[in-house]
Image: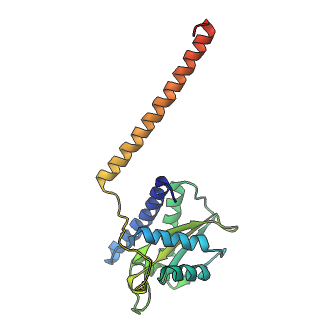
Amino acid sequence: HLSIRRQRQMCIRDRFAADLINQIRKQFGTKDVVVTEDSIRIANEVARKSTEEYGHDFKALSEVEKENGVLLGELAGFSDDPATTLADIKKRIYDDVLSMLFDDAHAQWGHATSLSGVLPENKNEGYMQYTGLGFRSNATFTSVIHYIKISDNMVSAKSKFDKSKVISAPSTAEKIARLQENVNSDETAYLNAYKEVEDAKNAVYLAKTGYG
């Protein structure tokens, strides 16, 4: 099982991507994309199973589809840029979104259409109603991000996909509480370090004076 901190980091990354996408959709007047716990889980399953160096791994997508009873779509970003910190990952997501939105003629603007939330003319075609991000690297690229596309019309009656557990952006009160939590943690770490220094000084003094 993932640690709470790891789960929180994953949620931050996915919410950041969703926020960027929804800023685009606001301009188009289309519906917001939604992130759920299960869309993140499915995205990570796709990333874990994918072995293609570049492009979509349709075998991996098919396996995850069968396991979950849902037909999936995917946008994918490939980069040699580092993705070791949260700031790195946010930059990668931002660069991917820009590229898919403005440099997509080679894909007949399919990526841009998905991000903008414009629905396909064919009602039997899937679109990005829910999304989640999966991360991996390979021998060619240091960073590969899978942006999963799930829509209600592609979810079977017996699907394992749970769309009810939506991951929303934190409220202002939640942001303040989290910042306070970080401050308290930093204060505790500082006080512990200060105590260790003082104890060490005291030990040195006692050793020099022969007391203790």
Locate residue 161, reporting x and y percent. 43, 76
How many labels, in total?
0
Looking at the image, residue 30 lies above or below residue 19: below
Locate residue 193, reporting x and y percent. 51, 30
Locate residue 32, reporting x and y percent. 35, 73
Q: Would residue 198 be found to the left or right of residue 171 on screen?
A: right
> Residue at position x 52%, y 81% from top?
65
Front-most of residues 58 and 127: 58
Which quadrant of the figure has residue 168? Answer: bottom left
Q: Would residue 206 be found to the left or right of residue 190 on screen?
A: right
Quarter of the image where the C terminus is located: top right
- Give the residue at the far right of this rendering: 139
> Residue at position x 40%, y 69% from top?
36
Which quadrant of the figure has residue 24? Answer: bottom left
Q: Is residue 98 visible?
A: no
Front-most of residues 4 and 96: 4
> Residue at position x 43%, y 82% from top?
127
Q: Is residue 198 visible?
A: yes
Q: Is the image coloured rainbow, by chain, by secondary structure, or in one colour?
A: rainbow
Locate residue 189, reporting x and y percent. 48, 35
